[in-house]
Amino acid sequence: MNSSKTREISKREKTVSVLDKLFWSVQPPAGLVKGEYYREENWFAPHFPGDRGYHGILEVVRENEKIQMVEFNEINSSTYYIQRYQGVSKRLSDYGFMQATKERTAKSGIVLVNGLMHLEKQMVEQNRLIGDFDLLTGASNSIKRSMLTLAERIDEQIKIPSKKYYYGLAEPVGKGITGRLQVIIEKGKIVSCFYDEIFADTQEEIEDSELKPYYRQSKYFCLDYVSTIGAGFNTIIDLLGEKVVENQQLTSLDGLPFTEQPKRAQEWDNYLSLAKKLQSEIDKDLGRKDSGDK
């Protein structure tokens, strides 16, 4: 073997298996979360000139001067060295499982989501976004170059009431799956609606044997999830978001596909169980009569 080939192989990280020694959670905040909404994002750690790097997104929800939620999400670089993970969510795909095969993870004992949730929890509990925090050993570029930087930006913004208001609801929808609905209101109108279903953190909690491999991932962001919906889960969720913004009604499925028998998607009923509750909450806060089903 020539020396250049040897150097190429030596740069590759050794593959290990430490999944049985690690645990992380991808579960969203349970129940209802609402408050003034703040969001900042950036691109960081490019690999070479012209590369945008990784896309960090920080969302903060604050009500009555109390932080209700802090959530950081990251979309991988489009030039990531593993093609499978180019441009995908690090938090809700199987990226954490890939990390569990890496030597550096075996040494640190954590994956990215561990570090993110550890910091998010401190920010909520201590009701602050800046200052000194306990960062887990080997805190990643994601935290140092994006999450903390974005937190500083939002810390300046929260001194002024936000023009946007957040409603989030996460509840079990059965068989080891949690439904999560997130809605953003601006000037009394819905400007964003996103629904996802998150698989349990352990395979034992998931009843359907065909779904067990997707644990610690969400249907929308999982790279391997095979939907029983003809158009795919992502497709109908994107259409749902567009339709809700257009008609300003969470509980109407008019014009959306796979809502009629015999091909009605179970996900629609799961969604409606959360949408009705959130619509009622929104109507109450906006001083409107509960709109119910339309």
Image (tube, helix red, strand yellow):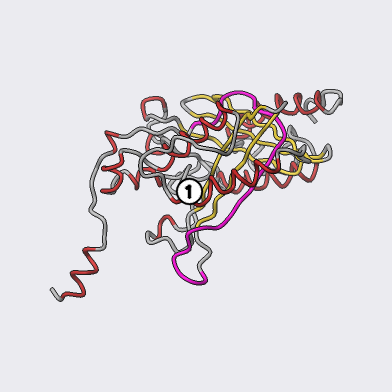
In the image, residue 32 lies in the stretch drawn in magenta? yes
Give the residue at x 61% y 36%.
Answer: 264
- Name the quadrant of the N terminus: bottom left
Q: Nearer the viewer, residue 191 or 275?
A: 191
What is the magenta range? Answer: 27-50
Furthest residue in direction front, as rendered:
131
Q: Which residue is mark 1?
A: 144
Structural crowding at the residue carrying mark 1, measured as other residues with C-alpha within 10 Å and reported as few (<14), some (14–19) or many (≥20): few
Amino acid type at mark 1: Lys
Q: Is residue 87 above or below residue 4?
A: above
User: Horizontally, is 60 left or right of 103 in the view?
Assistant: right
Residue 228 spot, x, y in % from top left: 51, 41
User: Horizontally, is 104 left or right of 289 in the view?
Assistant: left
Q: Is residue 4 above or below residue 69?
A: below
Furthest residue in direction right, as rendered:
288
Give the residue at x 51% y 41%.
Answer: 219
Give the residue at x 86% y 25%.
Answer: 287
Residue 285 spot, x, y in % from top left: 80, 26
Residue 176 spot, x, y in % from top left: 46, 26
Residue 151 spot, x, y in % from top left: 59, 43
